[in-house]
Image: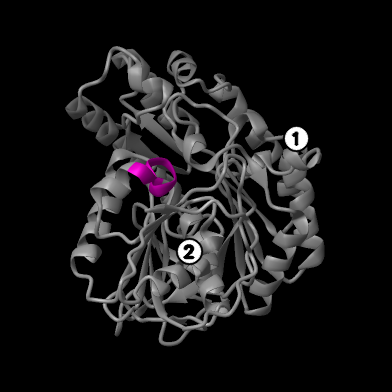
Amino acid sequence: MATLTTPLATKPTPAARPRTFHITTLGCSKNTVDSEAMEQLLLASGHRRADNAEQADVVVVNTCGFIEAAKQESIDTLLEIGEAKRPGQSLIATGCLVERYSAELAAELPVVDAFVGARNWSRLPTIVTKLDEARAPGSSLRLVEIAEPGELDLEILSRRAQGPSAYVKISDGCDQRCAFCAIPHMKGNHRSKPRELILREIGQLVEQGTKEIVLIGQDTTRYGHDLAQKDGLASLLESMCDEYPALPWIRVMYAYPRHVTERFLQVMAERRQVLSYLDMPLQHTHPWTLARMRRPHRDVDNLVGWMRDRVPGLVLRTTFIVGFPGETEEEFEHLAESVRRLRFSRVGAFTYSDEDGTAAFAMPDSVPPKLREARRRKLMAAAKDVTAEESRRLVGDELDVLIEGRPEPGSEWYAGRSWRDAPEVDGLVLVKADDLPVGEMVRVKVDRALTYDLLARPI
């Protein structure tokens, strides 16, 4: 087995023998952006997209290693594709799972031809060429390539719009060391993408008709600190608004509570294009649980109140972990009551997952899995009631909706989203109409509220 240690390369050279490829993406929106970048690198090298894995000469699986269920899905996908490989077809595993467990995966998954870490996917064209050369008679090669500590490739050659909304990754890695999280082991410390690269990427998307830019990263509110920028995210948002005044929506996801600043909230409140919507995972609300989690901001009530005072009408999405080691019934009930009292607009809940190498892995007082799941269901029931009440308040209101298409062929409805809903994770606005322009904003009136979705008609 060969281990490559050559530096990262972002400018691919043309492939001597173009191949067809297919990329399967698992995990979060950050992986989606990485997969788009991989695709552009391979296309720039002369390779061609295949419609599916069966037709491709090279199959790339962008794995997720965040929690146990994601790890298992990644391994199952690699095994399924690997066992169906035809002679001459190559399978490449990349992403977070590979970054952390490359040696173990290489030993356990002989069906995979190459393992490329999450921090150096820009090497993919070179890997494809080397695997192709290894197909020659008498050649045998498996590759494992993991970036040196500190390396991180954030530049994307070009962006191709996939729809009216697009994710833009402004940073990667994380400086925090939350007790439950293995992300720093996989992604390294926080690294900000230079502002000029972000603006160039957004410009490419806007030129192709993108109406919504969703900023993502492990900690978007930390943006710019490593570039000697104070309030880097606020400055970036202002630059985006000034540079692209016709861009309707800019949405921020993955905020870290301690890094939300006064100036950032001021920009959100004053700049029309920056939506009054924030995704900010809180993980818990009880101060004792937060202390064990190594989360620094433990006065959630004051934090949320401060933010809402500065951004009227703020839609706040958050996520929580239930069943963290040592979580008592009192601590859980505090969390459930906080969800009802603070009335978060959107809530996601996850059961705690043991991750080796994290501080929580060795903590005592483990919560039984069945109790974790019972608490998750109870928390989501409380959150569902709040969301349903918020949805009912919107009946009779007029909203601008970004139309994304019909939910299924032949449907009498169009599916879209208002500014209150982020792509993939929030609800939809279903608009009954014969013909609406996909990818455009349409003014609608809300006629009925479901729990998460709204039913509306154009006006």
448 in the magenta segment:
no
233 relative to 25, above or below? above
Residue that badge 1 annotates: 262
Foreground residue among 431 and 58 = 58
Give percent across and percent down for residue 15: 53, 79
Q: Is residue 421 visible?
A: no
297 relative to 330, above or below? below
Identify the residue at image location x=50%, y=71%: 39
Give percent across and percent down for residue 166: 56, 65
Q: For the residues marked 1 and 2, what is the alpha-carbon distance in whole angstroms? A: 34 Å
Which mark, residue 161? Answer: none
The amino acid sitting under disc 1 is Glu
Foreground residue among 403 and 233 = 233
424 relative to 414, above or below? above
Foreground residue among 106 and 253 = 106
| Residue 114 horizontal side relative to residue 225, left or right | left
| Residue 425 horizontal side relative to residue 30, left or right | left
Residues rendered magenta in the picture: 97-103
Instruction: Kindly state the secondary structure of the residue where label 2 is placed.
Output: helix
Residue that badge 2 annotates: 35
Give percent across and percent down for residue 412: 33, 81
Instruction: Kindly state the secondary structure of the residue where label 1 is placed.
Output: helix
Identify the residue at image location x=30%, y=25%: 323
The amino acid sitting under disc 2 is Ser
Examine the residues drawn in magenta and state their main secondary structure.
helix
Q: Is residue 241 visible?
A: yes
Is label 1 in contact with label 2 (beta carbons under 8 Å)? no
User: How many other residues sit within 10 Å of disc 1, few (<14), some (14-19) or many (≥20)?
Assistant: some
